[in-house]
Amino acid sequence: MEDSEKAWRAEFPITERFNYLNNCSLTPLHRRGRDRAERFLTEWTEQGGRAWYDHWIGEYESLREDLAGVLGASVDEIAIEPNVSAGLVGIASTFDYVKRPKVVVSDLDFPTDGHAFLAVADRGARVEFVRSPDRVRVPLERAPRAHHQNGDVLQRRILADAFAHLVTGYVRQIEIEADAESVYQNLWTANLAGSAIIKTLMGLRTLPGVLLHPTSLHLKQPGTWSRPITMQNLIDAGFGKLTEDPGKEIVLGIAGKFWRPTGNVVPFDPTNFDGPVPLGLARAMWNFHLQGLGSRRTILSTETRVVCGDAASRAKFRMYWMFVRPFSGLIRRLMLQSVKRECEMND
């Protein structure tokens, strides 16, 4: 662990006793947060309402300025809410639902998402819930369509969420000083296995197959490591392209019994990603997503989501994942760095 990481970890006293993983809206309080809360109570006790005008409004505006700098936005675009649910209620109240009344919400979304729009039903909002067939994914074809008066079709766009819900995911991201269009182009041309560490890890993953079948090693397996690996190489090797939003996101898919040392991948078949996962198999969705932060900054993230077909497969995958997760995360982080280097070389 680097010194900067240790310093951040030291901000949270609870980490001295636990590896705390419940970091949604229930993150533990950090030292500086507690200091600020105690100062807030002291100022409120000693100054009453005057504290708003002497201190708090100024600190509120300073926070907006800090957030604007992080997001690459102007201060006028920043509004601070106590939580996402409260913010969503405010957003829902601003829409005109006369011509476009339909609001599509998945039953896997956060529970208050739908209620924020149900609260404005008297203004014309009509909420439709897309039901998940297996409590893991929301098939794209289940998303209803709403028609404008001019005949154009409005459909909620679901990419990775069409194949597995976010609760099954694992995310890595990196910031690149380049526009999103350039990053997307370099994502396709960069050698994603340019690191010696990646080549070594991929070589170890294919080692059982080499030992058991020394004459059958070829370059058509997803574990190929003897040549540069680009996005197209991955697709040609067996990671099927499930969907693509050019310039913004691409989602790859692969299915098999990943916990097996050999013969662990089945040929790509799009039907393996429609409906429930076949018994005895797992399917993995792997995406690369771009978020532009102005003309010269882009967040490139990669997320892996895995869904198993039955309890036995889940148990085997969990055991397998317990060992490979650190290395899988390292590979993805190095891949993102490869794309960043490619962008910097071509800039």
Image: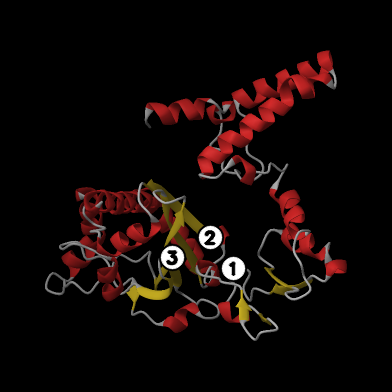
Q: Which residue is painted at 15% across and 74% down in the image?
A: 216
**Residue projecting furthest to the right:** 122
Residue 109 showing in the rendered view: yes
Closest to the observer: 145 or 95?
95
Marks 3 and 1, how far apart at CA = 21 Å
Residue at 26 percent of width and 58 percent of height: 192
| Three-letter code, disc 1 | Val
User: With 269 as the anchor, is 314 left or right in this view?
Assistant: right
Residue 131: x %, y % from top left = 68, 74
| Picture quadrant where residue 205 is located | bottom left
Q: Quadrant of residue 132?
A: bottom right
Amino acid type, label 2 = Thr
Q: Are marks 2 and 1 in contact (CB under 8 Å)?
A: yes
Under circle 1, the secondary element is loop
Q: Which residue in the structure is indicated by mark 2?
A: 168
Image height of 38 relative to 302, above or below = above
Q: Is residue 278 visible?
A: no
Q: Quadrant of residue 143?
A: bottom right
Identify residue for label 3: 249
Q: Earlier in the sequence, mark 3 or mark 2?
A: 2
Residue in the picture at 25% in, 63% down: 189
Q: Is residue 211 rendered to the left or right of residue 184?
A: left
Circle 2: is it few (<14), some (14-19), or many (20+) Cα within 10 Å? some
Q: Position of residue 270 (x, y in %)?
A: 43, 82
- The residue carrying mark 1 is 136
Three-letter amino acid code of the residue under disc 3? Glu
Q: Which residue is situated farthest in the top direction here?
A: 46
Label 3 or label 1, whichever comes before in sequence order = 1
